[in-house]
Amino acid sequence: MAWIPLFVAAVLLLLFPKKAFTILAALTLVIISIGLYLIVDENIDESRQSKVDIEAHLDPSLCPPTEPVFVKVTNASDATLTMLKWNLAVYRSGYHSDLNRMNRRYSPEYALLKPLSAGESVNFCYELPEIREDYPSSELRFEAIDKQVSFGG
């Protein structure tokens, strides 16, 4: 179906070359401008998303024993964060296998339920995700994965 506008444009160029060329040039500029805007907007959004940091580690001094995973979310971007969802991967030090991978579809997704202004940080304590085996807590490290971010105006 893309051939129909091309056919109409070719006919217009043959019948009314001056007017059709002017209109096609204007349409081409509009389409190029929209494409550039979308590319720049996507780059700005990716830059903002990369400036949202989620740090997670076990910290019994800051969190109760029932919720030992300390999570700090920092919005270092220049915009207000309106929505943030993520999941936690659990690794044993020195290993690359996610100990929580098999249970992730059943474990809760973590979310920030309030807006976070530019430059602001917030802390949470969460339960330890279910893992396949018992490992000493000193051997576990956490990483935020599957981060979904939205910014407000």
Image (cartoon, rainbow, N blue to C red):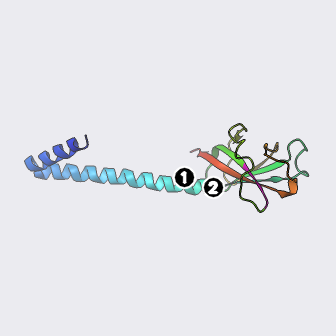
**Looking at the image, which residue is at 87% across and 53% down?**
59
Outermost front residue: 133
Q: Position of residue 37 (x, y in %)?
A: 42, 53
State the residue in front, 107 or 85.
107
Q: Which residues are magenta?
A: 89-93
Which quarter of the picture shows residue 66?
top right
Q: Which residue is mark 1?
A: 45
Three-letter amino acid code at the position of disc 1: Asp
Report x, y in % for residue 144: 70, 51
What residue is at 61 percent from the left and 56 percent from the top?
A: 50
Locate residue 119 relative to residue 153 in the image: left or right.
right
Q: Does any portion of residue 146 appear in the rendered image?
A: yes
Task: Report the quarter where the N terminus lies.
Answer: top left
Looking at the image, residue 55 sits to the left or right of residue 28; the answer is right
Q: What residue does disc 2 label?
A: 77
Nearer to me, 34 or 94? 94
